[in-house]
Image (cartoon, rainbow, N blue to C red):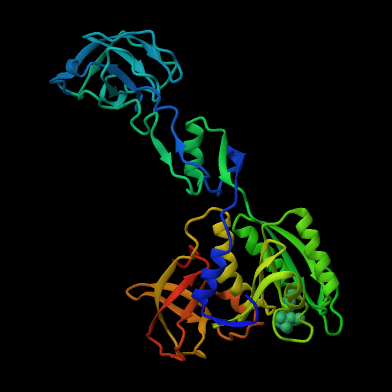
Amino acid sequence: MTGLEYLTVAEALEIILDGVAVLAAETVPLPEALGRILAQPIVAQDSLPPFANSSMDGYALQAADTVGATTDQPISLRVLGDIAAGAEVTITVSPGTAVRIMTGAPIPPGADAVIPVEDTNEPWRDEKRPLPTSILIKRQVQAGDYVRAIGEDIEAGQHILAASHQLRPQEIGVLASLGISQVPVIRRPRVAILATGDELIGVEEALSPGKIRNSNGYAQAAQVAALGAIPISLGVARDDEADVRAKLQKALEAGVDLFISSAGVSVGVYDVVKAVLEHEGNVGFWRVRMRPGKPLAYGQYKGIPYLGLPGNPVSSMVSFERFARPAILKMGGHTRLERPCITVVVQEDIQSDGRESYIRAVVTREEGMGYTAVTTGEQGSHMMTSLIKANALLIIPEGVKQVIAGTSLTAMMIDWPETVF
Ligand code: AMP
Ligand code: MG
């Protein structure tokens, strides 16, 4: 992979994804597993519920004893005792008897149903209320009514979650119910971020002639963190080969799974990243037929995948979206690597230059119109505010130079604001 190559977005993405592998597993405590990807399937060791229990506050009984019971002709049962949630059961229900039971308490032997308190003459839930000696049942119940059977949700031995499943709060809850306090997950990718350029100063520094603040370094670190990966900020390298080398070396020593740099990969005299990679890396320099973002460097530096993004802030962020994001997600064990894409109707004419274009846009849904999109205006690759306004990137396919209002296009949703949808 050397020299200038012209690639489509799809070709570039395929090569990049082929070049990165899913990372190894590690074990994390359950509270830290949110958002992580399971490295192994989860098999239930216990059944859930672990024992048959009541779904209502009421009386456990034999359903056969309630046949024909109505409000006008209630059936009387003798109350043997009380079972609270968490209690061990010592009482057995026999014909003609019932046991007061709380939600979640074990169904006593002999009982096959529960009658809710509301359907008795004792419609009180107050725990201090003395236990009645008998109870009037005002309606008939069937065997199994208000009983949560053992294993109804999960049976011991059942495969509950597949490897590659992403853990959301509900999965964390299920793992907790199953007693899994340590969770096998894919390691979070460590991604080194390097900004390059003599014009760059730190965020805390005052502007001086010819200088701009390093925004890419921060934006990219945030993009990495938003994926659940670990950004390792290498700061700014001067347009100086020795400085670039030193910064990359520092990252290698700290341990890194992917390098991402911005700028210095075009054909300018000061494109030192390119110079360093040409000497020491196995890196290709591409011209990707996309807009914004054309120059892209990809390969390996000392055995570690390396992605060199363009310098212009919007090009850098859009290239990250298109190439770095899927690569980092793949390394982190994700199986869905793409943003959700929907079809939208554009509300204005849009010009393109025949490259696959990613137009910053606002997608909304309007009554009777489905999803529609307007651009955020000026699309210059230095116009950061156009990304602040956008919730989507409209994709104009390669070869198309003019899109007429009313045309349907694919929108790659970078955000899904609840206020809009
Ligand atoms: P280059 O690829 O070095 O020619 O840079 C292209 C454009 O991106 C120039 O206008 C740079 O000043 C700008 N640029 C490069 N790196 C950064 C950065 N880290 N933050 C903000 N702008 C940058
Ligand atoms: Mg530069």
Q: Quadrant of residue 30?
A: top right
Whole-percent x and y of residue 347? 42, 84
Quadrant occupied by the C terminus:
bottom left
Q: Indicate whether 197 appears above or below 83.
A: below
Whole-percent x and y of residue 153? 36, 34
Q: Is residue 291 visible?
A: no
Q: Quadrant of residue 120?
A: top left
Residue for point 52% across, 66% down = 415
Whole-percent x and y of residue 360? 54, 78
Q: Nearer the viewer, residue 403 or 41?
A: 41
Q: Is residue 294 visible?
A: yes
Q: Nearer the viewer, residue 412 or 278?
A: 278
Residue for point 49% across, 89% down = 354
Q: Is residue 329 left or right of residue 396?
A: right
Q: Residue furthest left?
A: 68
Quadrant occupied by the N terminus:
bottom right
Q: Quadrant of ligand 2?
A: bottom right
Whole-percent x and y of residue 230? 67, 55
Q: Nearer the viewer, residue 414 or 20?
A: 20
Residue for point 33% across, 11% down = 132
Q: Quadrant of residue 404?
A: bottom left
Q: Is residue 198 left or right of residue 215?
A: right
